[in-house]
Amino acid sequence: MRAGRWTALVATAVVGALALSGCGRIGNAAGDGDGGAKFTLSETSPAPSKEIDSFSWAMYAEPFSLDYAYAFDYPDNTILSNICDSLFRWNKDLTVSPGLATKVDNPDPLHWVYTIRQGVKFHDETVMTADDVVASLRRHLDEKVGSFWASAFQNVESIDKTGPYQVTITMAKPDYTLNSALVGAPGVVESAKTLAKDGKDYGNSAAGVNCTGPFKFDSWDAGESVNLSRFDDYWDPKLKAKAKHVSFKILSDASARINALQTGEIDGAFMIPSNAADILKANTDAGTLYFGRDTTVQSLVFTDLAGTFKDVRVRKALMMAINRPALIKAAEQGYAKPTDALTTRNVWGAAKPSTVDEAFKGLAPLDYNLDEARKLVKEAGASGKKVVFSTASLSAAFDIETRAIASAAKDIGLVPEIRTMSNDKYTTLFSDPEARKGTDLVLTSWYLSSTEPLEMYSVLRTGDFSNYGGWSSPKYDALVNQAIGTKDPDQRAKLTAQAAKIASDEVVWGPLYETVTSMWLGKRITGADPSINYMYYPWAAQIGGR
């Protein structure tokens, strides 16, 4: 992203927000397979009319940690976004605006200078300074911490305080993607004193966190709930929480979650199981189901490229054996659309439309062709080879997809073994290499937390934390690294497109379909936005009474 654009973005407090109110529609998404519109995207829900004492929110799994360095999945970030602020904010329309940094300058290709907001208090009432920003960001560089977001800082040479409210990041080489990461968990600021005091206990269920968000940590009852209370000294009056308390209830059983929403036992939730969407849409007496912008692609991840899927022909074959339109209708009830890309188009916003068109046209389609798929498996000498497919009952859609993909593998001569795990265990597959041992294949709903497609393609470089299969391509690495160091956003996108084509041709991951953000608000509450930005925006502060 160009320095000039960033300086303009963060110099004005209202930059990036759309001038919309109510629950204005922003267009139709996927159809139901019969020509009709299955859902309509909304900007927001109606504004609340009053404050409330509390509300409850359903979670499909327990957070791995509330330590921002390990906040790498939906449960962690859904909660943490309301407790901790980042240097920048990700708005509901996927633009960026000021957060704990009010300005960033790029005086030369190797330096980023951040002006830190003054008068911000942590939840223990101490005042945030540049020292806290430095301590928080440096953790991502510390190998002893082992941050899951370390790759975002791979080109950082040093992070230093250069004034009471100024922090300078010095790069070893130019990197024009760093700031896009600072919208999310990599840009979170915690009290330096708290980090030093809590040490290895920081972010666990006993210690919690001490950040600057509109809610503060109260308690974490393992396997049951995470409970927050309003922080009355929050720095942004526009986002002072309208509820005094919020309780995130952990309900791993999808049916139990939906029943709790329909009865009003739980007030709201994101990620509504698609098989329940039609039911909830019809139950207008209980609440309202909203759909909004997303950056998520449901993909197959080949986690062991030294085994059955070592040969690209076998990876291609499995993708060609999956009837994706039929899968979407069966698993997602039509609340999705097929794609051959690992990113959605809306994360390519800095590029020219023609560049984006070319990027997506260049991706090799893997259309359903069972005969050709069987032929490829036979040519690769993979007939009869075992495939361990690890999965979890996250939703009915996951269960249907698991069975369909295992059936597709069997149809082309492979021998699938489904390994079902608990929801919490399943999330560790994406953070712990030991947990992935013995697994060949997993499903992921992979969301991007910025409008920078390199966020996706950078993770497929040799040795990256999220390069789960250990794939390696020197040509690919060189293209991605060149793109990261390219200032002009359109030229950066063109280089990214070349890398995307290589990843597509090699079927490093197998894209299945794009999803949509779904949000249920029960009849008591309103105010939140149905946008994927909830991962890194204090969405719960907006919720009040109808």
Image (cartoon, grey):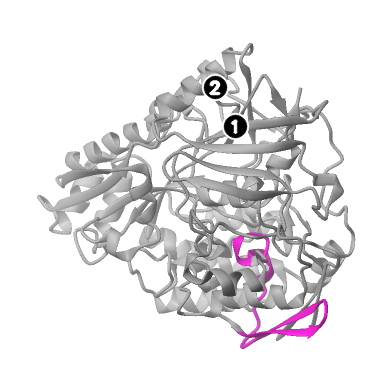
Q: Is residue 169 magenta?
A: yes
Residue 29 visible in the shown view: no
Q: Point out which mark residue 265 bears.
A: 2
> Nearest the camera: 58 or 365?
58
| Position in image of residue 340 (x %, y %) | 46, 48
| Position in image of residue 364 (x %, y %) | 43, 54
Q: Which residue is mark 1?
A: 56
- Residue 330 lies, with reference to residue 223, above or below; the image says above
Query: At x 57% / y 66%, what residue is drawn?
Result: 496
What's the amino acid at mark 2?
Glu
Picture quadrant of residue 397: top left
Query: At x 47% / y 20%, what residue is drawn?
Result: 259
What's the amino acid at mark 1?
Ser
Picture quadrant of residue 490: bottom right
Q: Is residue 383 magenta?
A: no
Query: At x 72% / y 72%, what residue is drawn?
Result: 488
> Nearest the camera: 62 or 409?
62
Mark 1, residues whose alpha carbon is within 10 Å: few (<14), some, or many (≥20)?
many
